[in-house]
Amino acid sequence: MLLNKAFSQTVVFISLGFTSALSPSSYKHALPSLSASSESFLSRADFLSAAVRISGVVTVLPQVAGARGRATLETAYDRYGPRIVDGSRYYEKDIRKMVASADWKGIKAATAEPPPKTKADRKKIDGGAAERAAGAGQLSDARVLVAADLWAGAFSENSVSVKTKQMREQVEILRRVTRGISRAALEGLGEAKPEGGVLGIGAKARSRTELQKDCAQLYIEGGNAWNKYISLSNEGLPSTMSKIKLIR
């Protein structure tokens, strides 16, 4: 169901693993109660294997208003859907745990982008794509958010539809959230200077508690963006279809 205006005015507090409606002013007081326990899950499925079907997710989508057609939607979902499903589930479970325990190394690995192509890669049969893909984090832009952008585009024809624009707006929020969490992790590891001042000079370093609190707030914002994106994606699909599950 499309998130309504009331949803946009309510923050769904998801960083503790349960759902509770809190106003933006009240969720701040709940942040210190984040659990200190964590289990970092850093396995890396090759993001090039985008056509692999995810168990339990129906990949046959019917034609809906504003889409290019059933066949195109099926092809697009087979290609990008598994990465979106994996990314949202990883965000819900693993990123939540990492933020709760200030697992900066885990967050750094989870948000890492694939390394740039080298001269040595050009000599390889696949151009080094497989090796570079192995270095992409489970929540990296290359693995997840690019796929989310492209799937949103499947709901447009000759011009960009309103639905595509709305879905991509949520992807941009997720990009900003991911960058913010990644930046905090690098600061926590001492690999990035605090923002502010001139090139970070004179900027006050955030404490572990401040970094964790900022990450928790970003995580909540990202969780709401995921749910808005998923709801928009599911909108208009018949009840016989298995839809992408919302983050809880």
Image: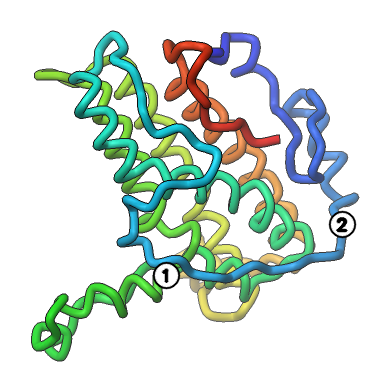
Using a 10 Å C-alpha cutoff, classify the residue at mark 1 as few (fewer than 14 neighbours), some (14 to 19) or many (20 or more). Answer: few
Rendered image: mark on residue 199: 1
Residue 156 location, quadrant: top left
Q: Check disc 2 and report its element: helix, strand or loop.
A: loop
Q: Picture coordinates of residue 91 (x, y %)?
A: 60, 50
Which residue is located at x 27 percent, y 22 percent? 155
**In the depicted structure, whether residue 138 falls above or below residue 81:** below
Label 2, label 1: how far apart the Cα atoms are = 34 Å
Label 2 packing within 10 angstroms: few (<14), some (14-19), many (20+)? some
Q: How is the image coloured?
A: rainbow
The total number of labels drawn is 2
Chain-order first, disc 2 or disc 1: 2
Label 2 amino acid? Answer: Ser
Residue 94 shown left or right of residue 228 in the figure: right
Say which of 214 and 147 sits in front. 147
Secondary element type, mark 1: loop
Residue 138 horizontal side relative to residue 223, left or right = left
The correct choice, above or below, for 242 with respect to 6 in the image is below
Relative to residue 84, is residue 13 depicted above or below? above
For residue 202, say whether it is visible: no
**Residue under the point 63% across and 16% down:** 7
Locate the N terminus and report the quarter of the image it occupies.
top right
Choose between 7 and 53: the one closer to the eye: 53
Q: Amino acid at mark 1?
A: Leu
Where residue 128 sits, quadrant-wise, is bottom left
Where is residue 137? Give x, y as percent: 47, 66
Residue 69 percent across, percent down from the top left: 20, 19
Quadrant of the frame with the C terminus: top right
Pointer 2 residue: 35
Residue ID at (24%, 21%) = 70
* Coordinates of residue 98 in the picture (x, y in percent): 70, 62
